[in-house]
Image: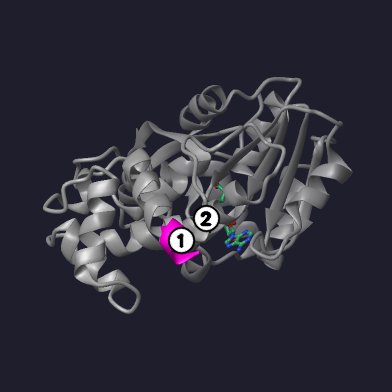
């Protein structure tokens, strides 16, 4: 029977053979548990008709499972040292394309055009490098890519923040930034022991399903996100207090009260109690007077 890459013994073997030393600075924690990967395939909705995009294939643990379950896999890897290893480990799978490129610099839309069928159901699946989780996810969900979903292993604390609902400790501007573009849910909590080397933090698998349209109507997106960030600037302070500070160069405090009233929002509430819809109403009311 075949020995998968995602096993402690095969991983050790490869590390030794290639004299590979993990780079912490590249967030290199490789998966050594096939059961977790099977679970991720299911959660991600990978089937033989789908296309898969991976960020950071490492030695190919997840890439191999994607190649088995999907029609086609394209993976972006930044670390040159991994290319010869991937060439060996993935030699049996003709449906994989490895691209040696920083995902933050890559033109992913162009890559999709080149490697996938027109209209193909495409899913992004990755065990992300934790040091740049948020920039990678924000780039991918804001790029208007023709992808159905993203299913990613990330730091548990960040997953919780991205999927958080109002009136919880984890809820903040990141929750709204992510949920404006996607429907977010934590689908799996993952023990440290499935990684080599083990990370210092707990991990979760987050699933993001791309929305076709934003859930709220926003007149100016940049201003909407600025106002949200300002509303969480000092979490313990009231919305009124944070808004006054944010708008102090443009409006009198009295005018801020008028905005709150027009939006039907009590200024003594804290930012963490507002829904995305309430933030949208408030941002639109203020933006109307700015524009
Ligand atoms: N997928 C492999 C696994 O699960 O065993 C490796 C996951 S490891 C957490 C993250 C991978 O992302 C590493 O292979 C690392 O070299 C790669 N990586 C780090 N920064 C990257 C970037 N900016 N663009 C592409 N890949 C990157």
Residue 155 seen anywhere in this rendered image of the structure: no
Percent coordinates x, y for residue 135 in the rendering: 52, 60
Percent coordinates x, y for residue 3 in the rendering: 62, 32
Mark 1, residue position = 223
Q: Is residue 269 left or right of residue 45?
A: left
Mark 2, residue position = 220
Badges 1 and 2: C-beta atoms under 8 Å apart?
yes
Q: Which residues are magenta?
A: 287-291
Percent coordinates x, y for residue 96 in the rendering: 79, 40
Q: Secondary structure at mark 1?
A: helix
| Magenta stretch: helix, strand or loop mostly | helix
- Please identify the quarter of the rendering in which residue 238 is found: bottom left
Name above or below for residue 48 compared with residue 138. Answer: above
Q: Residue at x 47, y 27 (%)?
A: 35
Q: Is residue 273 magenta?
A: no
Task: For marks 1 and 2, give the CA distance.
Answer: 6 Å
């Amino acid at each position: 029977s075949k020995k998968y890459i995602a096993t402690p013994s095969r991983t050790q073997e490869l590390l030794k053979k290639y004299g590979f030393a993990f780079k912490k600075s590249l967030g290199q924690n490789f998966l050594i548990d096939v059961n977790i990967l099977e679970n991720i395939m299911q959660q991600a909705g990978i089937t033989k008709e789908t296309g898969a995009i991976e960020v950071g294939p490492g030695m190919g643990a997840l890439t191999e499972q994607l190649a088995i379950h999907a029609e086609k896999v394209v993976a972006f890897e930044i670390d040159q040292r991994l290319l010869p290893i991937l060439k060996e480990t993935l030699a049996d799978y003709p449906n994989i394309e490895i691209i040696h490129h920083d995902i933050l610099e890559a033109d992913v839309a162009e890559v999709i055009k080149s490697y996938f069928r027109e209209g193909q159901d495409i899913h992004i699946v990755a065990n992300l490098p934790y040091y740049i989780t948020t920039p990678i996810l924000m780039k991918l969900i804001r790029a208007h890519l023709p992808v159905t979903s993203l299913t990613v292993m990330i730091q548990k604390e960040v997953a919780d923040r991205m999927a958080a609902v109002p009136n919880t400790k984890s809820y903040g501007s990141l929750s709204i930034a992510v949920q404006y573009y996607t429907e977010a849910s934590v689908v799996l909590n993952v023990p440290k022991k499935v990684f080599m080397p083990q990370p210092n933090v707990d991990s979760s698998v987050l699933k993001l399903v791309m929305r076709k349209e934003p859930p709220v109507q926003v007149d100016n997106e940049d201003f909407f996100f600025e106002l949200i960030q300002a509303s969480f600037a000092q979490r313990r302070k009231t919305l009124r207090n944070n808004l006054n500070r944010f708008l102090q160069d443009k409006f009198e405090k009295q005018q801020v009260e008028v905005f709150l009233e027009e939006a039907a929002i009590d200024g003594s509430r804290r930012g963490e109690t507002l829904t995305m819809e309430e933030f949208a109403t408030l941002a639109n009311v203020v933006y109307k007077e700015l524009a």
